[in-house]
Amino acid sequence: MTESPARPSALFVCVHNAGRSQMAAGFLAALSGGAVEVRSAGSMPADQINPAAVAAMLEVGIDLRTEHPKVLTTEAVKASDVVITMGCGDVCPIFPGKRYEDWKLDDPAGQGIESVRPIRDEIRARVLTLLDELGVEPVALPA
């Protein structure tokens, strides 16, 4: 009997873990259908997820209402195959052999939903590219 390969894993990091990284994690979890292990964290986590980010994701069928900002740990970085930063500067620990990407995205903090939608859509496009690079076929989101 052959062992099935381990699921790839990704960690999304931004400062507050309240907007961009949460949206990216939501998209990756939903679009991978569970085929990718997903983590998100922040260097200085906020008290709650940005309500405009939650509302924007609900519009596309992804519910972030039960999520909460988490603090970035060395263990989360070590456990991830891909680490994607989103404006967290130099606070993310670097380990040899890890794949790192920095996604330049506008910060949705303090923005209304009209401003958050284009950020959400850009994150979705980048997550679809990431899935392709990981060799994972995206699943359809619920209507």
Image (cartoon, helix red, strand yellow):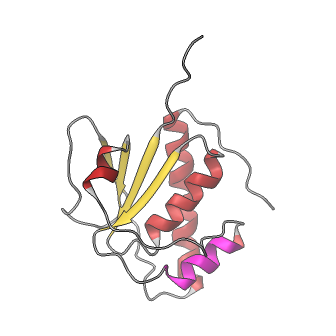
Nearest the camera: 18 or 5? 5
- Across and down, in percent, residue 84 comes to 37, 53
Nearest the camera: 71 or 109? 71
Left/right placement of residue 99 relative to residue 115 reads left
Quadrant location of residue 93? bottom left
- Residue at image location 55% in from the left, 77% down from the top: 53
- Across and down, in percent, residue 76 comes to 34, 52
Left/right placement of residue 56 relative to residue 99 reads right
Left/right placement of residue 44 relative to residue 136 reads left
Queried whether the magenta region covers residue 56, the answer comes back as yes
Predominant SS of the magenta segment: helix
- Residue at image location 53% in from the left, 82% down from the top: 115
Picture layout, residue 119 above or below residue 112 = above
Which quarter of the rendered picture does the N terminus lie within? top right
- Across and down, in percent, residue 94 comes to 20, 48
Nearest the camera: 142 or 78? 78
Picture layout, residue 125 above or below residue 61 = above
Nearest the camera: 63 or 31? 63
Which quarter of the rendered picture does the C terminus lie within? bottom right
Give the magenta-colored segment's residue range: 49-58
Left/right placement of residue 63 relative to residue 104 reads right
Identify the residue at the far top of this view: 1
> Number of callouts in the render?
0
Identify the residue at the far right of this view: 143
- Residue at image location 18% in from the left, 62% down from the top: 90
- Residue at image location 54% in from the left, 71% down from the top: 67
Picture layout, residue 7 above or below residue 1 = below
Queried whether the magenta region covers residue 15, the answer comes back as no
- Across and down, in percent, residue 9 comes to 45, 43
